């Protein structure tokens, strides 16, 4: 059976899992992946979180901590059942600090019978910060800024949305889980920015 390192992340959409197929080599510490080293072959599995309330409502989410919908719970369980049928056994699981991802991870592990695994959580695996668009309905943003501009903000590699205002009602600085890292909170992120801060992890 395949062995695995698991992560559930949301760097703009993903939960991640890794599977290590080496059953003989000794494990050494490698950044945050503690059971592998550079010589250890492994598989990395990315798994998107289940539908959240703001996914359902077509709103820009970013770091806002929106919960899973009932459909999102079903999606997470279905993903866990699929992974269970694959025969994968994860060595590690990594996710963001966002509860839609944490709950998705827990539901997946429950379906796989692997609830015993420690889930490593880190803000660098958080979803992309959409800046001042966070909380906005996507159709309303298109009406205000135009379809081409919103498409560039969403899909281009290096064009971030407008930065989040300090007084923004969903600013991460208002969330106690980030109070120790206020200077590191991004005001906005392009896909390039998100990739760079996630790769540091």
Image: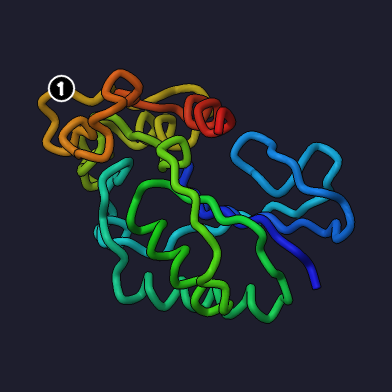
- Identified at 35% across, 34% down, the residue is 129
Q: Residue at x 29, y 45 (%)?
A: 60
Q: Nearer the viewer, residue 41 or 53?
A: 41
Left or right: residue 199 versus residue 57 is right
Residue 123 appearing in the image? yes
**Up-down relation of residue 14 to residue 53 (above or below):** above
Classify residue 90 as left or right of residue 93.
right
Quadrant of the frame with the N terminus: bottom right
Label 1 sits on residue:
166
Q: Sort mark 1 into few (<14), some (14-19) or many (20+) by Cα contacts within 10 Å.
A: few
In percent of width and height, residue 3 lies at: 75, 64
Q: At which x and y percent is residue 120?
A: 49, 50
Does residue 117 sit above or below 169 in this rendering? below
Residue at the right extreme, as displayed = 24
Q: Is residue 156 visible?
A: no
| Of 21 and 148, the residue lying toward us | 21
Picture coordinates of residue 155, whole percent (x, y) = 48, 36
**Residue 76 x, y percent position in the rendering:** 46, 71
Q: Secondary structure at mark 1?
A: loop
Please tell me whether residue 36 is drawn above or below residue 31 in the rendered image. Answer: below
Q: Quadrant of residue 180?
A: top left
* Viewer-nearest residue: 98 or 25: 25
Q: Residue at x 27, y 34 (%)?
A: 178
Instruction: Work out whether 126 lies above or below 82.
Output: above
Q: Quadrant of residue 32?
A: top right
x 74%, y 46%: residue:
36
Could you tell whether 174 is left or right of 15 in the image?
A: left
**Where is the C terminus found, in terms of image quarters?**
top right
């Amino acid at each position: 059976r395949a062995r695995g390192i698991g992560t559930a992340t949301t760097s703009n959409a993903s939960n991640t899992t890794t599977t290590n197929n080496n059953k003989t080599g000794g494990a050494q510490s490698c950044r945050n992946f503690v059971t592998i080293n550079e010589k250890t072959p492994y598989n990395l599995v990315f798994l998107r979180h289940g539908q959240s309330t703001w996914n359902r409502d077509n709103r820009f989410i970013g770091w806002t901590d929106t919960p899973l919908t009932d459909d999102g719970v079903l999606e997470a369980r279905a993903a866990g059942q699929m992974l269970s049928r694959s025969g994968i056994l994860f060595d590690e699981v990594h996710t963001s600090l966002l509860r839609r991802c944490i709950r998705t991870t827990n539901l997946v592990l429950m379906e796989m019978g692997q609830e015993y695994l420690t889930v490593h959580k880190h803000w660098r695996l958080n979803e992309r910060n959409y800046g001042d668009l966070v909380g906005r309905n996507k159709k309303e943003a298109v009406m205000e800024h135009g379809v081409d501009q919103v498409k560039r903000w969403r899909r281009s590699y290096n064009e971030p949305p407008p930065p989040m205002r300090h007084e923004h009602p969903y600013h991460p600085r208002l969330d106690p889980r980030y109070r120790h890292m206020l200077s590191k909170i991004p005001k906005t992120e392009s896909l390039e920015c998100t990739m760079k801060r996630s790769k540091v992890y």
